[in-house]
Amino acid sequence: MNRDSKIKLSFLLTILLLTVFCFNTQVMHLGTLPLKKKIIVGETLDLGFESNKFLQALEVDIQPNNCSALRNSKLTLSDTAPIVTNPGKINLSLKLFGIIPLRNVTVDVVPEIKVIPGGQSIGVMLHSQGVMVVGLAAVEDVHGRSFNPAREAGIKIGDVLLKVNGKKIKTENQLKDLVAQAGHNNKPVIMNVKRKNEEISFKVTPVYCDETKSYRLGLLIRDSAAGVGTLTFYHPDSRIYGALGHVITDTESGKKIDLSDGRIFEASIQDIHPGKTGQPGEKIGMLQNANNLNGNILKNTPYGIFGEISKPIKNPYFKQLIPVALPSQVKEGPAEIITVLKGNTMERFKIKIEEVTRQSKPHGKGMIIKITDPKLLQVTGGIIQGMSGSPIIQYTNEGQPVLVGAVTHVFINDPTRGYGVLAEWMIEEMETLSKETGSILQKKRDVQTIGHHNAA
């Protein structure tokens, strides 16, 4: 065989080996590994591979070494996964033959967080920063002419009115008084408006409305929101709670309500309107004595509302705190939710987690759930309004209850099914609030960065 033939043969063999290697199902799994992963202290550093002859050629470089039963910072995927002993950040570098880099994964190692599951029905009262524009309407003057002063000035639905003529606006009545004053003086009003993250000024001239006998701008506004939801969890050490599992938006504009202040109170469920295909059901609640459950609202986020509760709460089904599952620990299969159907009585109901979306960063739709409990289906028809925030509990093989998420949305065309948010994303919001309030929670879960890691 001449030299050129040997070179061609070597090249073809190399291509063949690389093709076989790359199309091995376990190796293809490398591409699905998240760039970031989170595990709890005491867990194994397991990447979820089954060992085979191809993967024995892969070497994992661990920096730093804070794993037990590991004498050096290198191992192969055929080795027993080590146990992580200390909190911090670990950089995993997967290399072929210990030379060719294939994937870098950053692992956050955090202490376990435990909470008291919720399930209590709560009344939610929320006041926005300023007043929100939820509609624009025409104003007819004494001559029958139609005007829309606000629209013509450039104001849009979803804008938040912060100031009028330099004065802060918190209620609809404040705005009416200032508009009337300007109209009587035949002057425009200067309106400071928040649109997304920008503050804009508009000059709007009031028009005297013949129908209402008052000066108007052609605005429909709302200064507060109220409703019924469900408490998801309570963290006793910090006194912080999480509820709803989704953001509170204005019902007219669909925009997030920027929080000024708000409170939660215990609610008693008086009636249930069952859900039907194309028509969501709802809980009908009434606010109870504020001494039973009373808290403020400090954050309105995509993953729920958060604040502090004035005194500890209890759950009749869980006398002890239970762990919060990381996204990687949530499994498809049987689970249960806790919610109220009548009065203040919390009940447990069976559900099935049909699908879990593997998320390495926060997103509201973390799982698809299906109501399977006969009683809940009979009374509610499935998931209904007011059930948002109901905690989702799973049990480990050892029978340990774990908070994995919260009910958030119903499928309009199938009220027995809906979405849930992963509990970890609610915990991250709680940790952010803990930093802002200086609670002891953050001191417990703060992780010290050890070594280096690659940015995702």
Image (cartoon, grey):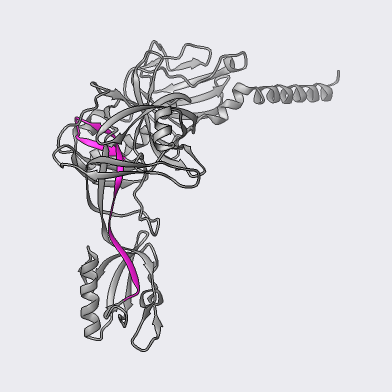
Residue 447 seen in this snapshot:
no
Residue placed furthest toward the bottom: 143
Between 194 and 347, the residue placed more toward the observer is: 347
User: Which residues, given as a range, are shown in magenta?
Assistant: 217-243
Q: Position of residue 25 (x, y in %)?
A: 63, 23
Q: How many marks?
A: 0
Residue 238 belongs to magenta span: yes
Q: Position of residue 200 (x, y in %)?
A: 34, 68
* Residue located 34% across and 35% down the image: 390
Q: Position of residue 347 (x, y in %)?
A: 31, 28
Instruction: Please determine whether, in this image, residue 213 is positioned above or below residue 74.
Output: below
* Residue located 38% across and 32% down the image: 405
Residue 140 seen in this snapshot:
yes
Residue 211 belongs to magenta span: no
* Residue located 38% across and 66% down the image: 135
Instruction: Please determine whether, in this image, residue 294 is positioned above or below residue 165.
Output: above
On-image quarter of the N terminus: top right
Locate residue 275: give its quadrant.
Answer: top left
Between 347 and 129, the residue placed more toward the observer is: 347
Locate residue 406: give its quadrant.
Answer: top left
* Residue located 43% across and 33% down the image: 377
Magenta stretch, overall SS: strand
Between 178 and 348, the residue placed more toward the observer is: 348
Q: Position of residue 339 (x, y in %)?
A: 32, 33
Between 103 and 255, the residue placed more toward the observer is: 255
Is 173 left, or right, of 227 in this rendering? left
Locate residue 255: give its quadrant.
Answer: bottom left
